[in-house]
Image (spheres, helix red, strand yellow):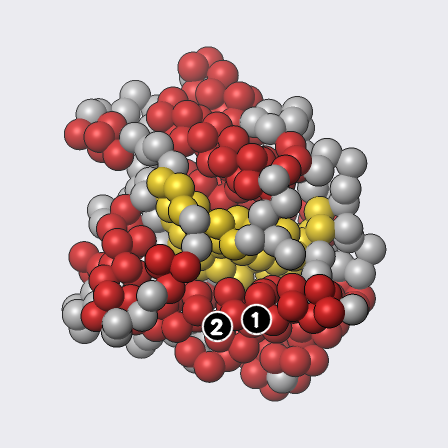
Amino acid sequence: MRCVRLLEVKSEIGAGTRGASLGVDALKIVGFNKGNSFFSLFPHKEVKVYNESLFENTPYPHAKRVNYLLQVQQNVCTEVWQTLIQDNFPVILAGDHSTAAGTIAGIKKAFPYKKLGVIWIDAHADLHSPYTSPSGNMHGMPLAMALAEDNLDAQINEIDEKTRFYWEEIKNIGIKGAKFEVSDLVFIGVRDTEIQEDYFIEKNDIKNYTVEEVRNRGVQTIVREILDEKLAHCDLLYISFDVDSMDSSISVGTGTPVEDGFTIAETQELNALLVADERVCAWEMVEINPTLDDKGNVMAEVAFDILKASVQSLQNQENQLLSV
């Protein structure tokens, strides 16, 4: 039976607003206040990050702090890889979403010959590269990193040689090149994109299960379709859950809330049903920012319940396999 291992990645250098580095501790405060022992049940490791670089000016406007983010990605990749080769299950609790590329790199390093499917539950597509990003914030780039994709057909920026060097290094963390096929990417809830991302999504026919479609067809139907049809051919699955996939009335404590998102119940059911598939090898939750939460620590309270339900679903699935 795989043991859950918590990896804490308190990096926020890829975000445009400050505070996501405090998200993990906000979750722990919720657990403490509830008298819940969740965080004492599992081994955990805090991954080294470089948030002190936020006090420096970045010379890379189209890939802000890419030099430090490269180091964070390498650290995340190593910890995920080590967790997986020890036959454990990494639950990654991260700050901004940029570090998900390190998670994917770690999975591929551990299983270089297995076909990986990626389920991206998010309001945003995160498909930008330094060549296409209007902001240069790298939490909008993790899927491009993992796909080793520049999207040059939609280029709006000219980048310098140093930026290009770091970007190429990031694309090749873990193993060289793309970590999965773009046809093995499924979006759930994406609804806030730029034209450069829209171009790439349409060009590659990436499936996005909109909030409306999930609501109309039902969570269970959508999950079955993803697992039994869309990604049935994949050996492994990775789930990345950004709290801004929920409606902005709920996800008040996050950097980029978007209206018309999922309810708490829908989100909890989605994650719990998806993670129960035995092919899922890692689950990640990102972008809790308690400094932006004008309702106290509500965002972390909601996220804590989703975290608990997802881990419980995973453990139930493991127990079922063990009893067979």
Q: In what quadrant of the picture does the N terminus appear?
A: bottom right
User: Which residue is situated farthest in the front direction here?
Assistant: 323
The total number of labels drawn is 2
Q: Residue at x 55, y 53 (%)?
A: 3
Residue 150 percent coordinates (x, y): 58, 32
Residue drawn at x 26%, y 72% as measured from the top left:
35
Residue 18 in percent (x, y) is at 22, 46
Name the residue nearer the viewer: 13 or 311.
311
In the rendered structure, the answer to whether residue 279 lies left or right of residue 46 reads right
Label 2: which secondary element: helix
In contact (CB < 8 Å): disc 1 and disc 2: yes
Question: Secondary structure under badge 1?
Answer: helix
Amino acid type of the residue tagged 2 in the rendering? Ala
- Decide if residue 306 is on the left or right side of residue 170: left
Which of the image's four quarters has the C terminus?
bottom right
Q: CA distance from mark 1 to mark 2?
A: 6 Å
Identify the disc placed on residue 309: 2
Front in this rendered view, residue 18 or 59: 18
Residue 288 percent coordinates (x, y): 32, 58
Q: Quadrant of residue 113?
A: top right
Q: Which residue is mark 1?
A: 313
Amino acid at pointer 1: Ser
